[in-house]
Image (spheres, grey):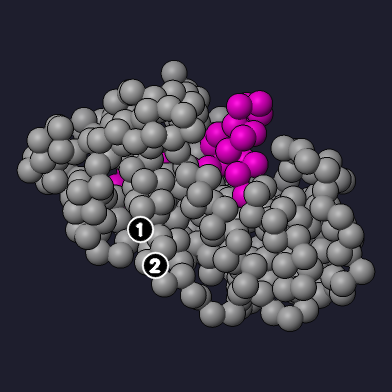
């Protein structure tokens, strides 16, 4: 079964199963990251984004919704670095064209493409700013925040994405959904102002590298606590939307959260900052257009990432097309 279809199924079938709280930063986390990224923007941008903050927030989950209807959507959210060997971060080409030449597009799609896709969407957004297409700016901004957030989740960087290889099934949603929902009210998510990113493609790889470095702690700490907690203490039940669902207990969640020592907060904060930075960078690279005349109404409610012209992406520095 395809790994992303499996995660989608787990997300839908949460009730009384062995994988509580499966999701992808959870809808809660994605919305919070996009919303807070708006407040990193400079005066020239923040009026437009605040005017559409509800759209930017609510549509943060559109890429996850598209997984059910677009076959190629799934791989855009993750990359299984460990299938490329212990030194994957050194051996994997950082540019899409080079990676395709080395591994083939089919191989890359099989194991995830999130760092390359972030760069692609960033360039789409730049083109939308240049053409002053408000609908595309909003759709692509919401999407870009989603993929950036996913790149900050450690379990999005490994083939053991839900602990299925280490008898820790459910850890994916536990880390990125249950913990933020329980504890993010106490997080300090102030990041300061957005700044220009000289090399967006390498910034995406830096995010992946930092997330992947945390994999060992994410898995080991949960296993250590599981060995200490009885099954009846590890899980509990809560009422949600007129349903009784099994969840990780507060005590187990709190113990895990403390062992992680601020990891989830740091990753959320970094995702917020990077999202704002890439929105700002796209605007600068797109000619710094005046956004005030673009206020208008938000785009029609759709899962589509947009149907504008086929943008052509350029390989950094060399100028070679990569799509």
Is there a contact, CB below 8 Å, between mark 1 and mark 2? Answer: yes
- Relative to 211, is 190 above or below? below
Residue sitting at 82 percent across and 63 percent down?
Answer: 129
Q: Quadrant of the N terminus?
A: top left
Per the image, label 2 sits on a secondary structure element best described as loop
Q: Residue at x 72, y 67 (%)?
A: 50
Q: Nearer the viewer, residue 94 or 69?
A: 69
Furthest-left residue in view? 228
Question: Does the magenta-highlighted stretch encompass residue 174?
Answer: no
Left or right of 187? Residue 98 is right
**In the rendering, which numbered label is found on residue 187?**
2
Does the rendering let one see residue 105?
A: no
Q: Which stretch appears magenta? A: 60-88
Tell me which corner region of the image, top left, top right, bottom left or bottom right, holds residue 183. Answer: bottom left
Identify the residue shown where x is 76% and y is 55%.
138
**Relative to 50, is 120 above or below?**
above
Quarter of the view holding residue 291: bottom right
Query: Is 165 on the left or on the right of 80, as rendered?
Result: left
Q: Residue at x 30, y 65 (%)?
A: 262
- Residue 191, how many percent across, how many down? 50, 75
Q: Determine if the magenta segment contains residue 84.
A: yes
- What is the secondary structure assignment of the residue under circle 1? helix
Q: Where is residue 119? Give x, y as percent.
A: 63, 56
Q: Which residue is disc 1 drawn over?
A: 183
Q: Position of residue 169 (x, y in %)?
A: 28, 31
């Amino acid at each position: 079964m395809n790994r992303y279809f499996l995660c989608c199924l787990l997300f839908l079938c949460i009730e009384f199963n062995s994988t509580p709280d499966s999701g992808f930063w959870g809808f809660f986390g994605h919305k919070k990251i996009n919303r807070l990224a708006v407040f990193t923007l400079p005066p020239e941008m923040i009026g437009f984004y605040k005017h559409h903050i509800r759209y930017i927030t609510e549509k943060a989950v559109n890429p996850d919704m598209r997984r059910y209807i677009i076959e190629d959507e799934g791989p855009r959210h993750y990359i299984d670095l460990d299938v490329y060997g212990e030194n994957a971060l050194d051996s994997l080409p950082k540019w899409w064209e080079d990676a395709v030449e080395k591994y083939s597009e089919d191989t890359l799609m099989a194991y995830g493409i999130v760092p390359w896709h972030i760069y692609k969407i960033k360039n789409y957004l730049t083109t939308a700013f240049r053409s002053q297409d408000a609908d595309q700016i909003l759709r692509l901004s919401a999407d870009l925040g989603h993929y950036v957030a996913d790149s900050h989740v450690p379990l999005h960087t490994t083939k053991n994405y839900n602990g299925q290889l280490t008898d820790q099934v459910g850890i994916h949603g536990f880390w990125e959904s249950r913990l933020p929902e329980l504890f993010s009210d106490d997080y300090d998510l102030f990041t300061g102002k957005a700044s220009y990113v000289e090399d967006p493609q390498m910034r995406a790889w830096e995010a992946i590298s930092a997330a992947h470095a945390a994999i060992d702690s994410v898995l080991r700490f949960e296993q250590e606590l599981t060995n200490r907690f009885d099954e009846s203490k590890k899980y509990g039940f809560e009422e949600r939307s007129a349903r009784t669902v099994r969840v990780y207990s507060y005590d187990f969640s709190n113990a895990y959260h403390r062992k992680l020592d601020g990891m989830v907060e740091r990753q959320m904060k970094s995702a917020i900052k990077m999202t704002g930075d890439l929105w700002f960078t796209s605007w600068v690279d797109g000619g710094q257009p005046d956004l005030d005349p673009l206020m208008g109404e938000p785009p029609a409610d759709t899962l589509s990432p947009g149907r504008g012209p086929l943008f052509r992406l350029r390989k950094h520095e060399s100028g070679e097309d990569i799509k």
